[in-house]
Image (tube, rainbow, N blue to C red):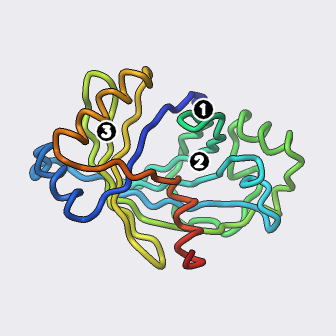
Amino acid sequence: MVSSIERELKTLLSKAEYDKLYTYFNLQNQPKIIQSNYYYDTADEIFKQNNSALRLRVFDNGSSEWTIKERVSELESIELTQFNREKVIDVPQALNEDIIYSADIQEFIASRNIVWTDIKRTMSLITERYNIDVPYGLYALDYTQYPQAEDFELELESEDIEVALEQFNSLLASVDISYKQAETKLSRAHRYSTNE
């Protein structure tokens, strides 16, 4: 189990801007990571009410992880992650405490009085991701398919958000891309599903 603070910047991209960054980062011969993301909540959206999300991420190699992200500021989230010992064969529709054995994630759920059997799968999406390591962090160039839409995004995760912000803005300016605020993928999935 891993607990960390995630600091990230992100901008939405058009398809043309995505293609421009794909070329800029010279990703033609780089492997892409395909990840299927499944989000869970209760019928009364307790996770959402707590500025958090519960996600199962399954990678194309069969490995997977459960993560709770709790937003603490505009650019920071606390992230609790359980790397699963076994490959996921069937993605669960509902949860119980046997599926998630991480003490920190169990404590998060208990501290919010969430009943395990009330947690159901609410959303799914597939992301094709290219990771680009840089001295000040990690860029992720994403193409995401939702049930009702698709979009493109550039993220930058960094320990030093001030340096990252400077570098992120410099990169966007150098390739003539305007910053477009990006909600979380889960928020966008909800918006797309309601056509807002």
Q: What residue do we see at 36% from left, 27% from top?
A: 164
Instruction: Tell us which disc is closer to us: 1 or 3.
Output: 3
The answer to whether residue 124 is above or below residue 28 is below
- The correct choice, above or below, for 49 with respect to 160 in the image is below
User: Circle 1 is placed at which residue position?
Assistant: 1
SS at mark 1 in the image: loop
- Which residue extends farthest right? 113
The amino acid pointed to by label 3 is Tyr
First of labels 2, 3 by sequence position: 2
Residues at discs 2 and 3 in contact (Cβ within 8 Å):
no
Q: What residue does disc 2 label?
A: 66
Quadrant occupied by the C terminus = bottom right
Q: Is residue 125 above or below residue 180?
A: below
- In which image quadrant can residue 78 be found? top right
In the picture, measured across the screen, residue 88 lies left or right of residue 156, that is right
* Secondary structure state at the residue bearing disc 2: strand
Q: Secondary structure at mark 3?
A: strand
| Disc 3 target residue | 139
Seen at 76% across and 47% down, the residue is 50
| C-alpha span from label 2 to label 3 | 22 Å
Query: Image quadrant for the N terminus?
Result: top right
* Left or right: 135 in relation to 56: left
Q: How many marks?
A: 3
- Residue 108: x and y in percent read 77, 39
The percent coordinates of residue 109 (x first, y second) are 79, 45
x and y, in percent, of residue 29 in the image: 10, 50
Q: Amino acid at mark 1?
A: Met
